Image: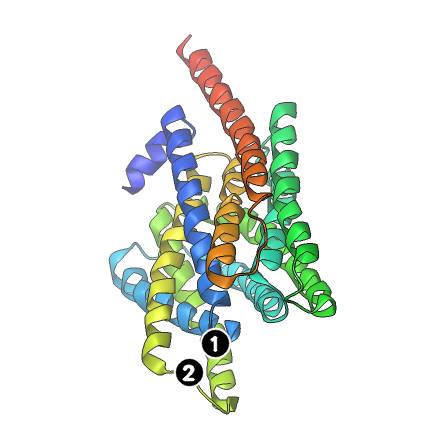
Amino acid sequence: MSNYITEIAGTPTGSQLAMFLALSAAILHAVFGALQKGRYDPWLSRGVIDLSYGIIAAPFALFFTPWPEPHMWLIFFGMVLIHIVYKLSQAMAYSLGAYTVVYPVVRGIGPLITVVIAGFVFGENFTLKQWIGVLILSLAILSLAVVNLYGSEKFKRKELYFALSWAALAGIMVAAYTTYDAYGIRLTADPFTFLAWFFFLDGILVFPWIALARWQKMETTPKIIPLIFRGITGGFIAIFSFGSIMIATRLDSVGEAAVIRETSTVFAAIIGWIFFKEAPIDQLFPGVLAIVLAGMIIIWRDALRENHQRDNKKFY
């Protein structure tokens, strides 16, 4: 599998697979965010989910994938730090604000910054059409937050503004970890070594202990079996979601994969509307969906055209 990924990286086949993986990551990430925001304390949910995917990844990291190269340990250290800041800021945002307000801000800010950083780190250059697509998609995503912020009386406005500040920081950290992790996964010979060790280290080091501390301070604790089930479910979703986007960045452009992944906001809006009763967007949602898809199509089609032109030049 690792050899196949290396062989198709940078080809039209790789580009198409990268888009499929990025879209899969989008759907899964929206479900993952809903699991963290759902009926339980978001810090508790995140801790149980992290512990679950850490335990799932442990045997693969320790026994079934090649051992990381020496230079990767410093990469893993930086990776863990970035993800800690991201998860702390996201948990704060979920604690204070509505899912359908917070999530679009996090995911709308991320792609704009990621595209810029990827240009410096990986030398990726977006065409004018792709930049237009990025702007269309990001503004459409952020508009969902604006609609939900001013269209609902269910939430305290002051708390939501604090939530938006934390969400903005989380969005910046999304760009940071997307670029940094894409850099890291390209430094190891086997991408599955990177993924296994990421989930193992990220899963066991911080948030399970935060969750344990909060559990001990709770006057009324939730039922343990449903919480464990949520953690295991979220753990598998996290592995497939993050794993998909990381392989996508290994196969093709980091910026393109990051932007397509942020269509998760559309799926998050549906989840928030149906399950959390947060979003009065039944009239606006079709239009926003069309705009988001338009931005995504512009980016992807231009990228495919560039890949085909590059292959034709190699052929001739």
The disc labelled 2 sits on which kind of residue?
Answer: Pro
Label 1 SS: helix
Q: Which residue is mark 2?
A: 222
Q: Is residue 26 above or below residue 135?
A: below
Disc 2 residue crowd, few under 14, some 14–19, many 20+, Cα 10 Å: some
Q: Are marks 1 and 2 in contact (CB under 8 Å)?
A: yes
Q: Position of residue 190 (x, y in %)?
A: 35, 47
Residue 155 lies in quadrant: bottom right
Mark sitting earlier along the chain (1/2): 1
Compare residues 277 and 262 and report the one nearer the observer. 277
Q: At x 29% / y 55%, what residue is drawn?
A: 65
Residue 12 lies in quadrant: top left
Q: At x 34% / y 75%, what residue is drawn?
A: 226
Disc 1 residue crowd, few under 14, some 14–19, many 20+, Cα 10 Å: many
Compare residues 242 and 163 and report the one nearer the observer. 163
The disc labelled 1 sits on which kind of residue?
Answer: Leu
Compare residues 100 and 60 and report the one nearer the observer. 100
Q: Position of residue 268 (x, y in %)?
A: 50, 52
Pick the quarter of the image with the C terminus. Answer: top left
Residue found farthest to the left: 64
On screen, residue 129 versus residue 16, left or right, reads right
Q: Which residue is mark 1?
A: 44
Residue 2 lies in quadrant: top left
Pick the quarter of the image with the N terminus. Answer: top left
On screen, residue 196 versus residue 64, left or right, reads right
Q: Is residue 12 above or below residue 58?
A: above
Q: At x 37% / y 45%, what residue is drawn?
A: 189
Label 2 SS: loop
Q: Position of residue 175 (x, y in %)?
A: 60, 49
Q: Position of residue 137 (x, y in %)?
A: 60, 38
Residue 128 seen by the camera: yes
Q: At x 61% / y 59%, what residue is drawn?
A: 102
